[in-house]
Image (cartoon, helix red, strand yellow):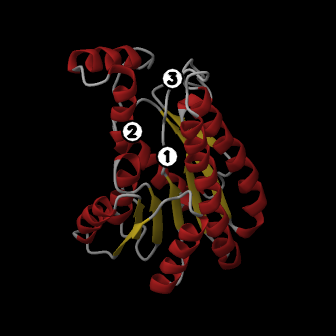
């Protein structure tokens, strides 16, 4: 898909890998400059180098979304460099799986802090800038786990359901200021996050990892594996002028896994 984002300024958290990386590259391919935020600096730099090949600007920003001050300074940075922010994709997240009586309090707190607080912190800063400029597009990343609530995913599902609720409320708050807020519920995609899930379920046993992966994919009605670009295309559409009347929505891009 092709979009005209020439001159637009985008910010992507979790942009160093997986879905965030794919979104950042698609923005750049269609003319937008991108601030790439990620906890691992080397990943930010790598993606920024790829972005610059498209002839647009890129900023690498090392970020822990749990730290509000760091999130605030990130938005100060994009304003200092580019004067505005048009698109924000909140893709930073963790998925720690375990039956709740066995899950550590550390992992429960980490999931809440990254998936809920990190998303809200970024939305707070983005809306403070977008609403006065009377334009902006925010896309949050939820998950099919927010709807298909399975054993071992209780905390993760709860955090991603919170993203659905926050998105719906924030979209209504900002609607009169020409700012849209939506979220996407991706399906099963073999990103670095899913590799970490396989680490938790199957460890280093390669055969078991593949068996678990195939078993999970059986739940997708269309029987086809997904790629990160499937999510990035929807993100780009939600940031396009054609999607101007879509806000407060959660959109499943999952091959029919949820409804």
Q: Quadrant of residue 150?
A: top right
**Residue 96, position in %: x, y?**
49, 33
* Vertical side of 41 occupied by 194: above or below: above
**Residue 103, position in %: x, y?**
55, 28
Measure the alpha-carbon separation of dots 3 and 1: 21 Å
- Of residues 34 and 122, the one nearer the viewer is 122
Residue indicated by mark 2: 193
Q: Which label was assigned to residue 16?
A: none
Whichever of callouts 3 and 2 sits on the residue coming sooner in the sequence is 2
Exactly how many numbered labels are in the figure? Answer: 3
- Of residues 69 and 247, the one nearer the viewer is 69
Whichever of callouts 3 and 1 sits on the residue coming sooner in the sequence is 1
| Point 66% across, 55% down: residue | 245
Check disc 2 and report its element: helix, strand or loop. helix
| Point 63% across, 69% down: residue | 125
Quarter that holds the C terminus? top right
* Vertical side of 120 occupied by 97: above or below: above
Callout 1 crowding tier (Cα within 10 Å): few <14, some 14–19, many ≥20: many
| Point 56% across, 29% down: residue | 145
**Residue 1, position in %: x, y?**
36, 51
Whichever of callouts 2 and 1 sits on the residue coming sooner in the sequence is 1
Mark 2–mark 1 CB contact (< 8 Å): yes
Residue indicated by mark 1: 93
Q: Quadrant of residue 53?
A: bottom left
Check disc 3 and report its element: helix, strand or loop. loop
| Point 36% across, 42% down: residue | 228
Residue indicated by mark 3: 257
């Amino acid at each position: 898909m092709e979009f005209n984002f020439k001159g637009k300024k985008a910010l992507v958290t979790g942009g160093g890998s997986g879905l965030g990386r794919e979104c950042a590259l698609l923005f750049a391919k269609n003319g937008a400059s991108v601030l790439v935020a990620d906890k691992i600096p080397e990943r930010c730099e790598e993606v920024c180098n790829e972005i610059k090949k498209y002839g647009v600007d890129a900023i690498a920003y090392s970020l822990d979304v749990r730290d509000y001050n760091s999130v605030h300074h990130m938005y100060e940075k994009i304003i200092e460099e580019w004067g505005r922010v048009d698109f924000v994709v909140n893709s930073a997240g963790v998925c720690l799986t375990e039956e709740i009586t066995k899950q550590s309090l550390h992992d429960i707190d980490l999931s809440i802090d990254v998936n809920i607080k990190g998303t809200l912190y970024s939305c707070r800063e983005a809306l403070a800038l977008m609403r006065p400029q009377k334009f902006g597009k925010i896309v949050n990343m939820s998950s099919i786990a927010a709807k298909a609530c399975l054993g071992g995913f209780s905390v993760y599902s709860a955090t991603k359901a919170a993203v659905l609720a926050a998105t719906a409320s924030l979209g209504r708050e900002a609607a009169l200021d020409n700012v849209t807020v939506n979220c996407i519920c991706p399906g099963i995609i073999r990103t670095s996050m899913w590799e970490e899930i396989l680490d938790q379920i199957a460890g280093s046993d390669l055969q078991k990892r593949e068996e678990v992966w195939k078993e999970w994919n059986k739940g997708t009605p269309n029987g086809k594996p997904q790629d990160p670009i499937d999510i990035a295309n929807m993100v780009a559409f939600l940031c396009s002028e054609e999607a101007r009347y879509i806000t407060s929505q959660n959109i499943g891009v999952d091959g029919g896994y949820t409804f």
